[in-house]
Amino acid sequence: MRGGTAKLLTLLRPATGEVRAKAVTHATNAVLHPWLQAELTAVLDALPSVAIPEDERPPLARWATWLGHEPRDPLPPLRLLLIWDNLAGHHSWAIVRWLLHHGVMPLYTPLSGSWLNLAESIQRTIVRRALDGQHPQSQDELITWLDDTVAGWNAHPTPFTWHGKRYERRQRARQRRLGGSPAAQPILHAIAA
């Protein structure tokens, strides 16, 4: 019996694997934006302050690198990059202005490119772990399971690493599946003469 659905608002820090997430019944801008502002404020408060002038900062830590030009209005030092989906609500001037005035540069995944957003991947992992072998009987139960799973994940988070151990395991498994197939041969040989 289905008692409703739940959405998982998610922020992921790939370097540490830390997840900030909250299960909710609706994910409208009226719910998402205040949650995002509160979470980003906590993240920014935990970061060290920036005292280096803009022109002396490394290129990737400058507004002009990401904007493509010098900012028209004075902005605080760039402190954080936020990568999120290219949804209309994410382009709302109210939230974009808030981000810019707090030193956060929003970067958008291309249309049909949500797979580039690592938060989508961690959401699938959390949902799979929360529901593994269980069938929630109510929306509240589902939300509790999701929140508990996030807390469990954060107890021992897994940092994201390009071509890390998981990638290597998948490559080895692929080689085993292909076995002696010419597709698995590292050196090209003529199959037919």
Image (cartoon, rainbow, N blue to C red):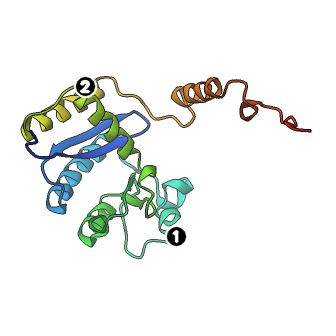
Percent across and percent down for residue 145 are: 16, 31
Residue at the spot 26% in from the left edge and 27% down from the top edge:
132
Q: Is residue 149 left or right of residue 14?
A: left
Disc 2 vs disc 1: which is toward the camera? 2
Label 1 crowd bin: few (<14), some (14–19), many (20+), radius 10 Å? few
Q: Which mark is residue 152?
A: 2
* Marks 2 & 1, CB-CB < 8 Å contact: no
**What amino acid does circle 1 point to?**
Gly
In primary-sequence order, the first of circles 2 and 1 is 1
Percent across and percent down for residue 15 are: 44, 36
Callout 1: SS: loop
Against 155, residue 110 (above or below) is below
Percent across and percent down for residue 48 are: 36, 42
Residue assigned mark 1 = 68
Q: Observer-nearest residue: 172 or 119?
A: 172
Residue at the spot 38% in from the left edge and 34% down from the top edge:
17
Callout 2: SS: helix
Against 54, residue 159 (above or below) is above
Residue at the spot 13% in from the left edge and 38% down from the top edge:
143
The alpha-carbon separation of the residues under discs 2 and 1 comes to 40 Å
Where the C terminus falls, by quadrant? top right
